[in-house]
Amino acid sequence: MDSITASKQEKNIDSLDEVLFYQQPNYLNIKILHNNKEKIVLNKTRIQLFSNGIEIKGIDTTTKILFHKVDPDAKIELKLYDGKEVYTFSGFFGKDLNKGGDFYFVTISNFNKISSRAEENSMDYNSPDYKTYRSRFIIAKDYSVDIPEYKKIKKINFIIFRPREYGDGTYITSIENIEYRK
């Protein structure tokens, strides 16, 4: 087999992988993290999704929700009620929702329990980039969130949304609430 034939076969396999990837249902995977430990999503956790202000009902399987396709240009708002915590995320459109994706609802109340990029990379305190990487925290193993004033923060809530995309994807972070130390 010559290199041109091998290259064509590789492209066909990639195309087939992509087609199969997008044929999966457009589930929204829901994860709740407290100090980077996953919390079990309980029945008392309630999730609402709005498209241009109109509530959309989904099929709920506790940690995954399947929604019907919505207008790709519609502004989407998602609300999660978990006990006393309420998260609201409105940083995406219908085109992102229609692909499905992962939502991480994150609360950090103890930064000593969360690894920073500086710790992960065993950076020296005297390194010129130490301060930047010390305030870049690793969430759910795959995501980095910059929280420069973390020493002043008592508790922070934020959301990470990663739309399902074939290949390398992006993610969106929305800070919900910050309580500062007195």
Image: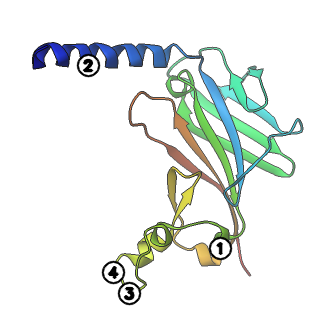
| Front residue of this view, candidates 97 and 100 | 100
Which residue, as the protein is rendered here, is positioned at the far bottom?
Answer: 126
Amino acid under disc 4: Pro
Amino acid under disc 3: Asn
> Closer to us: mark 4 or mark 2?
2
| Front residue of this view, candidates 22 and 79 | 22
Q: Is residue 109 above or below residue 76?
A: below
> Which percent across, then down, holds residue 39?
77, 48
Amino acid under disc 2: Glu
Which residue, as the protein is rendered here, is positioned at the far right?
Answer: 44
Between discs 4 and 1, the one toward the N terminus = 1
Q: Which residue is mark 2?
A: 10
Residue located at (39% from left, 36% from top): 168
Quadrant in which residue 24 is drawn: top right
Q: Residues within 10 Å of mark 3 (few under 14, many from 20)?
A: few
> Which percent across, then down, holds residue 36?
66, 57
Q: Which mark is residue 128?
A: 4
C-alpha span from label 3 to label 2: 47 Å
Amino acid under disc 1: Asn
Q: Which mark is residue 126?
A: 3
Disc 2 secondary structure class: helix
* Image side of residue 139 versus residue 176, left or right: left
Between discs 2 and 1, the one toward the N terminus = 2
C-alpha span from label 3 to label 1: 20 Å
> Which percent across, then down, holds residue 33?
70, 51
C-alpha span from label 4 to label 2: 44 Å
Do tag 2 and tag 1 residues touch (Cβ < 8 Å)? Answer: no
Between discs 3 and 1, the one toward the N terminus = 1
Between discs 3 and 2, the one toward the N terminus = 2
Q: Which residue is mark 1?
A: 112
